[in-house]
Image: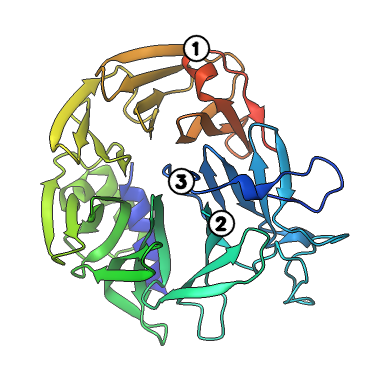
Amino acid sequence: MKKMIYGILIFFMSLGLYGCAEQNQTNINTLNEDYVFEGGFSWTNSYSDKGVIRACEEGRKMGVCFYYNPETEVQVPLCTKINCEHQGYSFSDTAPSCDACFGESVLCARIYGNYIYYVSNMSEDGLFKKHIYRANLDGTNRKLLGTMDEAQELVCGIYEGDYLVYTYKKLTTANGEALKKTQAGIYIYDIKNNVMNHFSLEEQYELTVFQATIVDNEVYYFTAYMTEDLTDKSYEEIVELTSENYLETIRKIELWKYDLKSKQTEKIKIMDFVNGKKMLGFSHAVWEEDGRVYVMDLLEHRLDYFEHNLDINDHYLTMAGNGIVVNDKKSFFFWSYSDKKLIKIAETTDGKIMVPIMVGNKWIYARGFETMDVSKIYCLSKDKFMRGEFEWIELPEVE
């Protein structure tokens, strides 16, 4: 247990529908094949231009999934039962009758075609496994598609077109004994062909796969690891090493590629600068180095870069389908993949710190922080954003 706690400490210190409601019903059957989640990732919230899938994490509706439509600003549970009260999972009721309740633990819900896909780690064969399920859009006809036997802890999930991509790490044995080196890997589920691919990485100290994407049958991913074992050191020793920048010399971040056809891996780049943002998605890889933001086109294998004057430790980068959003507490900028120009969108005036979650072709979702402990989720049309009209719409709570 001590090794697990210090392992987590070291890593983070080194990282600088058709509803049941009588009114405002939404026909979720209109969410067809063009509903593609390509943004970021959230354990219980999935964002796209078609809307947001959200699962209640606590209270009497725990485990109940809701669909929010940004066009109509309506949120409904994924259930079509008449007069259903949408009761969630509880210790007194482990099998609620509401079709929108997918159990105590609902992760990575995503609508694709005529189905909703999601991950659960609640089953009789242990908590260290994760399971991929498919259900109808009203929550019925649930089917187990595959089991991620090695996925003790999910790290990252990305939905790209026909694929569900999950990265994981494994810190202990089945008996609960801490592993000297971390095991990690990636699962890729092919929706169209109903095929699960899996590959594991070479074990390293504090290894994690913190970003991944898939482009033309090739999986690109960022790894971070330590070249030395520090788990036996005390908290005071770790703080001292951090102040001396020693951790920066033993921490490595690398960009890799895995070919689904040949099953071969290739190291693309070793990051010279371990701090700063690293991102993958929309057929691009992005990282910060020497005051620049580098953008690699993974289809054309072309490398571009741009510069900004924001504080390296106090700004945000968010990938979009046609560019990159850059912002701090005061200003928003946009860099286009095609124009290769950084333009200022607008100044923020309401005092909130807006951290973009996902930037789509039509909608932008962000978490707005009134204080560091109080935040809410907002959305804004992409057109208004590009015009600098920050009329953010607050999403309703799921409760």
On screen, 262 above or below 323? Answer: below
Residue occupying the point 72% across, 77% down: 94
Residues marked 2 and 1 touching at CB (< 8 Å)? no
Residue 232 locus on image (x, y percent): 29, 69
Q: CA distance from mark 2 to mark 1?
A: 35 Å
Camera-nearest residue between 181 and 42? 42
Earlier-in-chain disc, 2 versus 3: 3
Quick one: quadrant of the N terminus?
bottom left
On screen, 1 above or below 68? Answer: below
Q: CA distance from mark 2 to mark 3?
A: 12 Å
Q: Secondary structure at mark 3?
A: loop
Question: What type is the residue that disc 2 sits on?
Answer: Asn
Circle 3 sits on which residue?
36
Q: On residue 210, which mark appears?
A: none
> Colour scheme in the image?
rainbow
Q: Secondary structure at mark 2?
A: loop
| Residue 150 falls in image quadrant | bottom left
Residue 236 visible in the displayed image? no
